[in-house]
Image (cartoon, grey):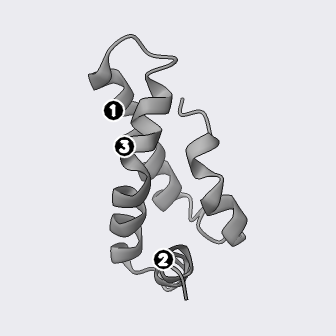
Amino acid sequence: MDELDKILQLLKKGDRRGLELLFHHFYKPLVFYAMNFLAQQEEAEDAVQEVFIKFWEGKRFLIPKYSLEALPACCPK
């Protein structure tokens, strides 16, 4: 089982450790991506944190694994 499989299994169980692992795995790449659209690094960091909060609250982890792999390509709002 690879790391994303482990993360997905934890998320499906509602285990917050899955969110923490997901955050640590994708946070930096998403912040760098967000900086293409936002002027300040702090704004990019806030936007990425908001994405993870909405992801957790919306139970968006009940999606196929390929969506987790595509997460860095998403555009944080």
Say what amino acid the circle numbered 3 marks.
Lys
Say what amino acid the circle numbered 1 marks.
Asp
Residue 28 numbered tag:
3
Q: Judge by depth and name the residue closer to the eye, 40 or 58.
A: 40
Residue 58 screen position, x and y as percent: 56, 58
Above/below status of 7 relative to 67 = below
Can residue 50 be seen? no
Residue at horizontal 44 percent and vertical 52 percent from the top = 26
Q: Which residue is mark 2?
A: 3
In this rendering, the count of numbered labels is 3
Say what secondary structure mark 3 lies in: helix
Q: Are marks 1 and 2 in contact (CB under 8 Å)?
A: no
Q: Are marks 3 and 2 in contact (CB under 8 Å)?
A: no
Spatial CA distance of label 3 from label 1 is 12 Å
Q: In this rendering, which labeled residue sits more in front, label 3 or label 1?
A: 3
Q: Which residue is mark 1?
A: 46
Can residue 20 be seen? yes
Write down the quadrant of residue 29 in the picture: top left
Residue 15 screen position, x and y as percent: 39, 80
Q: Is residue 69 left or right of residue 53?
A: right
